[in-house]
Image (cartoon, rainbow, N blue to C red):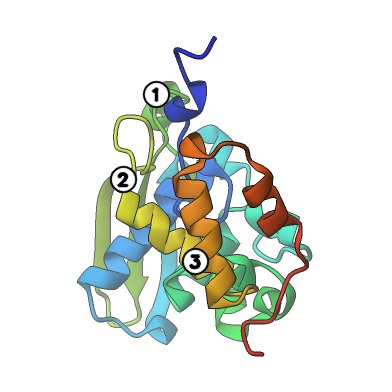
Amino acid sequence: MGEKWLIAEQYFKPFAVCRWAQPSIAGVLKLRQQHDFDLKSIQTIRVTTFHEAVRLANPHPETTEEAQYNLPFPVAAALVHQQLGPAELSGQGLHHPLVNQLAERVELVEDPDYSARFPAERLAQVQIKTGEGSIFDSGEVEATWGVEDPPSDKALQEKFRWLALSCLLPERVTKLEEAIWRVADLPDVSVLGQLLAQPMESNDL
């Protein structure tokens, strides 16, 4: 007790969805960044992955929970928005016309090798085919931000600010970040508790 911190051995999620969908999303974002293709020209998005991930097969989620434990929808949303947070996975984000069109074009294929390597590894390969006949291949992609490949402090801070600034004013976000980052050195956690207990704010005020 107090010598080994198990929280340091957990993974972080770069995207706000089930860990099983993370490699597929990383794959489509990799292709989006590497190639200049028109999203409307996409004919198929072929996702080859492990058995458990293939079962997350609902292209049209009706709730944010269904969107998070999903594969076709967040893959399509990542292609369109190039990020996945609360706005993309709830409310009006669930009814985005292009996202829903692309979700229909996602084909899920189970790979026996990827299934055998689960849960030690969570793998996927994404191929995007366009109407012009081009095929873009991500190659094998593994879920990132795990124990073996943790995010940098900068990456965690950037994600925190991105999410927190959507509902809190910058001053409070800064105070929260400072308190969280030095929580081990605080005499007690009352400061952090007070900051967390305050009502949410609109960043547009």
x then y, percent, for residue 179 = 52, 51
- Kindly identify which residue carries mark 2: 141
Badge 3: residue crowd in 10 Å (few <14, some 14–19, many ≥20): some
In three-dimensional space, the C-alpha distance between marks 3 and 1, rounded to whole angstroms, equals: 41 Å
Residue 1's place in the image compared with 128, above or below, is above
Q: Is residue 57 visible?
A: no
Q: Residue at x 34, y 85 (%)?
A: 38
x then y, percent, for residue 5 = 48, 21
User: Closer to the N terminus: mark 1 or mark 2?
Assistant: 1
In three-dimensional space, the C-alpha distance between marks 3 and 2, rounded to whole angstroms, equals: 34 Å
Corner quadrant of residue 88: bottom right
- Kindly identify which residue carries mark 3: 174
Residue 74's place in the image compared with 115, above or below, is below
Residue 120's place in the image compared with 124, above or below, is above
Q: Residue at x 74, y 75 (%)?
A: 91
x then y, percent, for residue 200 = 73, 70
Q: Residue at x 56, y 59 (%)?
A: 72
Q: Amino acid at mark 3?
A: Thr
Q: Circle 2 — which element?
A: strand
